[in-house]
Image (cartoon, rainbow, N blue to C red):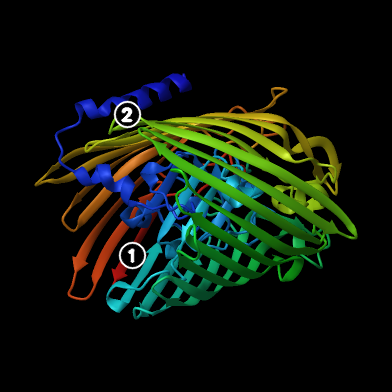
Amino acid sequence: MRRKFLAIIIAQSLAAPAFAAEDHSEEHAKALDAIVVKATPLGSSLGDLIQPATVLTGAALEERKAATLGETLSREPGVHSSYFGPGASRPIIRGQDGARVQVLSDGTSSMDASTVSVDHAVTIEPFLADQIEVLRGPTTLLYGPGSVGGVVNVLDGRIAEQAIDGGFAARAQLGTDTVADSVFGMARIDAGSDRFVLHADAFYRDTEDYDIRGRSEIDADEDEPEGTLENSSLDAKGGAIGASLIGESGFLGLSVSRFDTNYGIPGHGHEHEDESQNKGGEEEVVRLDLEQTRIDLKGGLDNPFSGAESLRVRLSHNDYGHVELEGDEIGTEFDNQELTGRLDIVHGEIAGWRGAYGLNFTRRDFSALGEEAFVPPSDTEQFGIFLVEGKDYGPWKIEFGARYDTQSIDIDGASADHSGFSASVGAAFAVSDAVTLNASLDRAVRLPTSEELFSDGPHIATGSFEVGDADLDEEVANQLDVGLKYRSERFNGSVSAFYARFDDFIYLSETGEEEDELPVRQWSQNDARFTGFEAEGVIHLSESDSGHFDIRGFADTVRARLTDGDDLPRIPQTRIGAELKWHLGPWRASAGPVHYFDQDRVAEFETETDAFTLWNAAVSYRIDADAASFDLYLKGDNLADEDARLHTSFLKDRAPLPGRNFTAGVRMVF
């Protein structure tokens, strides 16, 4: 029934242009060609990419921005959220998360500890983003073994690559919401001359425990409190200062940024039987106090030497640490010192082929100290080289690429060395000006992480005692992706289907044993299969004196199993969503539902998740003044006040999504 329902919806969406009202909005058909995807060294436009991709920018990005990156992208096709409360939420792409999805800040790793554990925050502030890019499927050729599932690239403009129009630009935002009595704000300034640009930004967010419908625990006793998710508050602040020298043939810039946050881990605590420590044997709340300072250097040259069109270099240093607080006491302390660098060179055309080659390296010193340090201290070195090439043959566009990576992890005098070769080939065929068919075949290698190799201890975030395996082999993904894109004045749409076969897929398996009163989970390997599709379409209904009306719809699904037939855990629910958009002069508005189907294909010892529907709406009004513009906005999320639980979340049985919420604020541009 579910597959039939989805097939009907998608067929109707793709057929919709034949019945859409007359419209002369040619800019919609050209919009994809105007968006440049910075995550690719060739600077391809969104419409020219063979690989499935989504770019959020402009008004669409402003409407989606949320407190975490995972929540900001949670309504994009193929992208879900790991949701570990409002303080930690990482993107999941096509059912893959953690070390299989690379999160980048302007092309460089976020360099936090979010891949180590789901309760660790991504140290990127979405409200400061100019553009967010999502590349679905393997992007290992460009960003290494940590991007088998895909890449999320956040552009924040902290290092300017060109002069500011008019010499000055600034924006700010203030807001509050009802679900957590939050107060948040951000400000940014860019100023300079034709040769020099200064940048400064800052953000602040303070929230209380958020409201929910009913009780947090699915099987809670009737005497349990309801209406609020305890220990879900957070406090976050940070900012950056950057400077760039701009020349006729290139640029050189430096930025220093800071990210601080303190947030609760809902649904987690530590019981103390000793009443002198905690009266009545109650649980102490667990909070995470995180600090990160990073320094980024970026430069570029146009036509640096014969045969090269451009050269870009990035070098980043990271000083990251967080402590897990059990009441007022420090339980576990994490530290991550990291240095990463990247070089991209775009070569001139050779026999019609245009491409790029480059290298990247990472040096990481990671440690976790304390009673619940389930991962031992380790030193990791990674190095990779890559080549990507493309050529147009009339209506055909051909791309191929290759990459080689090495990795060495040292721990307590022992070491684990791995290497891998990845390759990709893709093609797109322009059937007409409106229709393009595309397909790609990838062989992507992921090298095991130190957590998968050497874990040995209680991991409270996942509620388990994790045991690694130092003999894990490289994980190999062979993926086929086929798709169709349709673009016209009245309709833009795309559909992609994928099949991924994983050899030696690394996952946490249940052992049925217990250690320290926690279930023992072993990092294991087995072959696995991922299949699914995404579809998205925008119908431009009409444009008249009563306004411009659009309808956006999307759907996605993924099925993931081991080859022995067992389902993998925490695979996203199938979704379908729709949104009616309207704008007229200074007014903009949107409203629509996102329906999550139930998830009954679950792994052993995993509970099923019920279906739910999230109704969302937004309205804004722009006031233009001589030197500034002001957007007054009001958003409503989960308007039906559903008890909504994400199957992708470790906390789904103890921490639902926030209840009905209204957010109001003002965005200012100077």
Along the horizontal axis of the image, is 202 left or right of 490? right
Along the line of sight, the residue nearer the viewer: 9 or 538: 538
Q: Which amino acid is tagged 2?
A: Ser
Quadrant where the image shows the C terminus: bottom left
Provide residue 35's location: percent of width, then percent of height: 35, 51
Crowding near the residue tagged with mark 2, few <14, some 14–19, many ≥20 C-alpha atoms within 10 Å: many
The x and y percentages for residue 475 are: 72, 39
Residue at the spot 18% in from the left edge and 43% down from the top edge: 25
Residue at x 24%, y 41% (from the top left corner): 550
Q: Which mark is residue 665?
A: 1
Could you tell me how many numbered marks the image carries?
A: 2
Q: CA distance from mark 2 to mark 1?
A: 34 Å
Residue at (75% x, 63% y) in the render: 366
Residue receiving disc 2: 13
Nearer-the-camera pick, 390 or 509: 390
Q: Is 150 situated left or right of 301 in this image?
A: right
Q: Secondary structure at mark 1?
A: strand
Q: Compared to 508, does 117 lie above or below?
A: below
Quick one: SS at disc 2?
helix
Quadrant in which residue 624 is drawn = bottom left
172 left or right, relative to 445: left
Residue 122 locus on image (x, y percent): 58, 59
Q: Residue at x 32, y 66 (%)?
A: 667
Would you say the residues marked 2 and 1 are in contact, meaning their CB atoms lie under 8 Å apart? no
Does any portion of residue 73 appear in the rendered image? no
Where's residue 134, x and y in %? 48, 48
N-terminal label among 2 and 1: 2
Q: Nearer the viewer, residue 202 or 618?
A: 202
